[in-house]
Amino acid sequence: MSAESDRTTGTIPEWKREEVDEIVEFLQRYDSVGVVDVTGIPSRQLQDMRRELHGTAALRISRNTLIALALEEIEEGLEELVEHVAGQVGLIGTNDNPFGLYQQLEASKTPAPINAGETAPDDVVIPGGDTGIDPGPFVGDLQQVGANARIEGGSIKVVEDSTVLSAGEEVSADLSNVLSELGIEPKEVGLDLRSVHSEGVLFAPAELDIDVEAYHADLEAAAAAGHTLSIDAGYPTARTGPVLLSQAAGDAKAVGVSAAVESPSLTDDLVSTADAPAAGRRRRRDGPPDEKHRPGALP
């Protein structure tokens, strides 16, 4: 390390101070800032993720101690993220809302092979069916890891869906090789959001994991219920005003007809109402209009 890089400002080496300053600038640039887990993501794939995020979010990787210093330096609630700065992590910043950020990160995750020694995130299942692999030692490998397999019709077949590892268990070298041979990728690789701070609120991933379509449907149902309630209560708004006026006009017309109020706008209704009893008597006297023309009717 050069003499210049050894210079310190207070108790922090100058290069670290500069790095912290850059992280602080990064944090101040965005409305929403979160901590993401980057464990197990190959560097090439990490670069691809940076490119995919370009324009909507930005990723910053640094030493955990320096990230923590920057978060504590800014305060404004961001220091609450420090407890999530552990292991292989990075910072992510966006001017989008945290719900949009979470959805984007989840959508960007891709299936990946699982290596020996890793922990299975979910149950690992080898599906039943023809593997397309010619008879050979591989049938024994399948049986060794717990799959119900046999040779049938000139190929190796898995008789039924076989759960070969439970979530939380460690993957063996044998199982990793079998899964690789079958092309099974039982894990997802991507940026896991640990927590995000936005507008003074700290969000956990579980709070951001919402069904957007269901949420929209709930909003539409609530709006419809509110609209109906407003009309029933006679509460005028820009949306309910025309409906209330139409109802009031209808009610006023009904009262006017019932009270036989003479008005040009009610003339037709009053005549129709007055003629209704006579029209009924005529129908009873004459029968249906086509009664005389019905086959077999008396002359």
Image (cartoon, rainbow, N blue to C red):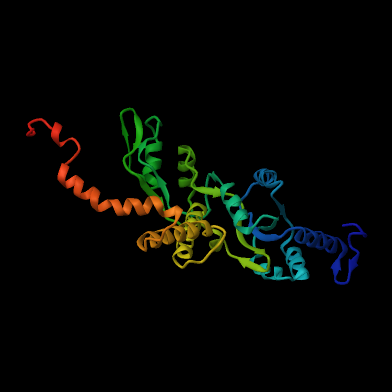
The image position of residue 41, as x and y in percent, is 62, 49
Quarter of the figure that contains the C terminus: top left
Above/below status of 98 relative to 127: below
Comparing 32 with 169, the one in front is 32
Comparing 260 with 246, the one in front is 260
Q: Residue at x 89, y 67 (%)?
A: 8
The image position of residue 156, as x and y in percent, is 36, 34
Asked whether residue 166 appears in the rendered view, the answer is: yes
Above/below status of 113 relative to 260: above
From the viewer's perspective, tell me whether residue 147 is left or right of residue 117: left
- In the rendered picture of this protein, how many numbered marks are placed on residues? 0
Asked whether residue 39 appears in the rendered view, the answer is: no
Quadrant in which residue 148 is drawn? top left
Q: Residue at x 14, y 31 (%)?
A: 293
Q: Residue at x 66, y 64 (%)?
A: 197
The image position of residue 64, as x and y in percent, is 71, 63
Quarter of the figure that contains the N terminus: bottom right
From the viewer's perspective, tell me whether residue 183 is left or right of residue 41: left
Above/below status of 82 relative to 294: below
The image position of residue 275, as x and y in percent, is 29, 51
Comparing 163 with 117, the one in front is 163
From the viewer's perspective, tell me whether residue 150 is left or right of residue 32: left
From the viewer's perspective, tell me whether residue 98 is left or right of residue 268: right
Q: Residue at x 91, y 64 (%)?
A: 7
Quadrant in which residue 74 is drawn? bottom right
- Of all residues shown, which one is farthest toward the top? 154
